[in-house]
Image (cartoon, rainbow, N blue to C red):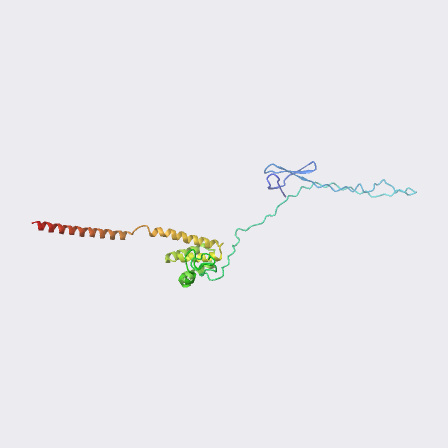
Amino acid sequence: MKYQCEGCERLVPLESFQVEDGQLSVTCRACGATTLAETPSPAPSSSQDAPRSDDGVRGGSEGVAVAVPMVAPFASAPPVPARASVTALRVVRSDAPSVMPAIPDGDPFQAPPGHCPKCVAPMREDTEACAQCGLVYANFLPEEHQPSELLASEWHALLGEWQDWDTHDRLLTMAMGRGELAMVGRLYRLRLARTPDDAQALRGRDEVVRRVTSAVPLASDGPSPEFGRKVKNTVMGAVLVVALVLVLVLFQMLRGSF
């Protein structure tokens, strides 16, 4: 049996107790605090209601005594310790399977209504062009903004394993190698236009931006060593030609002076 200590609010086993002034006293062995509880009052004795054996039948003219059996009084019940108040705990399973988000309706390669078909930005009312990318909506050609067949098939496969980030990473690496990273960024924006709270789509869009910004400095670090050698050879050849021309001019001037 356990009870809840009022000092440290722990559930500690009830090993010993004392009754002091009609109250149950229990000392916590963890913190030393004393918890008091009221003891139930003992049941009233029935000896008060039972007739005594020496009482005779009153009102009889002959005075005959009738024996009445004595009812033994109830023994007082021992004090019952107060029952600990235990709060029911709700078990939470950490290994519960996560709920798979539903695939949004509509074409995954087309912008939903109310969004620019090119940059997927929200449209403004009573405007004929996108304020973000400058596209005139009447001039939009859907076939110019379609992913390749390989990227489209990989994206459809990704939709079936949307919660697996390793699949997202493989798709991003493949698109980066094929030069289609911008198209993948557009696909993530299309997904966010339909499900703005999609954590995987937000992460994928940010990863596209990170990879694009990290790839640009690598492409502009400077000329390659081969290009540097070509420039050096060209400069040396030009200097040699100029030197030969100057020698010829000097020779002609010296020849004319004699």
Residue 105: percent from the left, percent from the top? Answer: 49, 61
Outermost right residue:
61
Q: Quadrant of the N terminus?
A: top right
Residue 23: percent from the left, percent from the top? Answer: 68, 38
Residue 42: percent from the left, percent from the top? Answer: 73, 41
Question: Does residue 79 appear to the left or right of 68 in the view shown?
Answer: left
Residue situated in front as seen by the camera: 193 or 108: 193
Relative height, residue 227 to residue 79 (above, below): below
Outermost left residue:
258
Relative height, residue 81 to residue 138 (above, below): above
Question: Does residue 187 appear to the left or right of 224 in the view shown?
Answer: right
Question: Does residue 1 appear to the left or right of 162 in the view shown?
Answer: right
Relative height, residue 243 to residue 104 (above, below): above
Question: Does residue 72 appear to the left or right of 214 in the view shown?
Answer: right
Residue situated in front as seen by the camera: 4 or 132: 132
Total numbered circles: 0
Residue 205: percent from the left, percent from the top? Answer: 43, 54
